[in-house]
Image (spheres, rainbow, N blue to C red):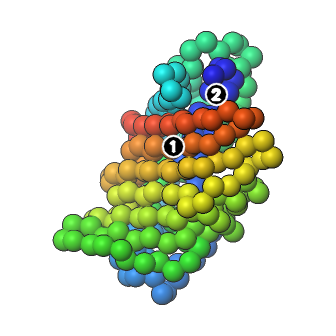
Amino acid sequence: MSAKRANLILLSAVSAACLIPTTALADPSWPELFREAAIPNETSQLTSMSYDVQATQADGEEQHVLKYKIDIPAEAKPSVTVNEYPAGIDESDKKELLEDLQADIDGDIWCDDHKDNVGGPVTLVSENDKEAIYTFPANPESAEDKVERKMLERSVVTITVDKARKEVSKFQYDLQKPFKPAVIAKINEFTMEGSCTSHEFGRPVLSDVTVRVAGKAMGQSFNQSTVQSFTSIQIN
């Protein structure tokens, strides 16, 4: 795999981890526990945040690592500091990757705002004393482009809620049917699994996200996975 292609895969996986828009209202027909967990607790006013991200992409025996820090101060422009680039890339690729990361800053590491992701009935599939698991069709209306819409039209979302904390502890997107993002490409498998943790700010945040994609492009099969870890999360 070329270094440039590795950069694009890493960046697309980072972007995919933030499929949690914030515009729709909660549906009163949703189960009460899901409704409580799917709507953010915004009683505290956010002024600043920072966190570290490590994205590790694997493609067969090849592995590429990207490490960077996001800083969103109260009264200054958000910034990205790259601490480690994928090995083997040149200065022009480094510059382009940094610009893409900078343009993609949104501070959306929350796990509790899924209301705009719901594209159909929310169903309780299982529960025990500690957690409840819900599933629903993804919402294609939340897509930012045609490719994402195709994927969401064919995907199901699963949300795990911690009963004691009334917080989302896990979420997962699963592609149910293959689709073609382009004439020369086909995605056969796509999953995105996220784990969440409580934060003293009062809202659960991402701890890690794993994205797996398999398919064909330009006549060649590919099977890639990217694991992102979010650490040193400071929110004020």
Q: Residue at x 76, y 57 (%)?
A: 146
Q: Amino acid at mark 1?
A: Arg
For mark 1, what is the residue? 212
Q: How many marks?
A: 2
Answer above or below: position of 191 versus 115: above
* SS under mark 2: helix
Residue 79 at x, y = what percent?
Answer: 61, 33
Tell me, yes or no, if residue 138 can be seen here.
Answer: yes
Answer above or below: position of 65 versus 10: above
Query: As rendered, which of 114 and 150 lies closer to the eye?
Result: 150
Residue 140, quarter of the rendered image: bottom right
For mark 2, what is the residue? 7
Query: Crowdedness of circle 1 by 10 Å Cα count: few (<14), some, many (20+)?
Result: some
Q: Amino acid at mark 2?
A: Asn
Q: Residue furthest front?
A: 219
Q: Residue at x 57, y 26 (%)?
A: 81
Tell me, yes or no, if residue 11 can be seen here.
Answer: no
Q: Residue furthest left?
A: 129
* SS under mark 1: strand
Q: Residue furthest bottom?
A: 29
Query: As rendered, which of 126 and 73 lies closer to the eye?
Result: 126
Q: CA distance from mark 1 to mark 2?
A: 16 Å
Query: As rendered, which of 99 and 44 lies closer to the eye?
Result: 99
> Sequence-wise, which precedes: disc 1 or disc 2?
2
Query: As rendered, which of 28 and 40 lies closer to the eye?
Result: 28
